[in-house]
Image (cartoon, rainbow, N blue to C red):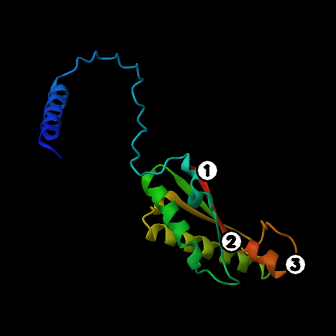
Amino acid sequence: MNKTVRIALVALLCVGAAACSKKQEVKPQPAPEQAAPVQAPVSDGKYTPADLDTDACLRQRVVYFDFDKTEIKPEFQQIMACHAKYLQDRPTSHIRLEGNADERGSREYNLGLGERRGNAVSDALQANGGSASQLEVISYGKEKPVCREHNEDCWSKNRRVEIVYTAQ
């Protein structure tokens, strides 16, 4: 490049830089009116009575048992923890644990088995933080079947404890 072209380029750059450094007057545009943002209420992590119908864990209110057994199966441990937390969060709530058995065995035996199953659920709830004063155990034995057929599939549905909230 020859010398005159270089000088012309430098001069052009200086003029351009000077023009860029000048402040341009910009008229402020009025801001569009916006509603104040609505903030969701902060959850304190505690269960509410509405959660009994919306929370997947709390909606599960039946614990099933194996034949002649009172031990809670591992798949029901999470349910015990959820209901125990609800009892902790809601000290005025109360649960009735309704123990049931299948049709096999005597009336007296099944009443006792239903009570032992209800007590097993009560113990599990208390072990997870629930209070004994919030729990009531009742046994119906074989008197309230949900299935009346005479086969293993049906009997397995009748070997249960139902969790019934009497005060939320």
The answer for how far apart the CA atoms under marks 1 and 2 are is 21 Å
Query: What's the residue at 79%, 66% (across, down)?
Result: 146
Helix, strand or loop status at disc 1: helix
The quarter holding residue 74 reads bottom right
Residue that mark 1 sits on: 53
In the rendered view, tell whether residue 87 sits above or below residue 26.
Answer: below
Residue toward you, 39 or 80: 39
- Mark number displayed over residue 160: 2
Q: Specify whether 22 is left or right of 159.
A: left
In the rendered view, tell whether residue 11 sits above or below residue 2.
Answer: above
Helix, strand or loop status at disc 3: loop
Q: Position of residue 37 (x, y in %)?
A: 40, 30
Outermost residue on the right side: it is 149
**Mark 1 crowd level (few <14, some 14–19, many ≥20, 10 Å Cα):** few
Q: Where is residue 102 in the image (x, y as percent from the top left)?
A: 77, 76
- Residue type marked 1: Asp
Indicate which label's residue lies in the foreground, 1 or 2: 1
Is residue 168 in sight in this rendering?
A: no
Residue that mark 3 sits on: 150
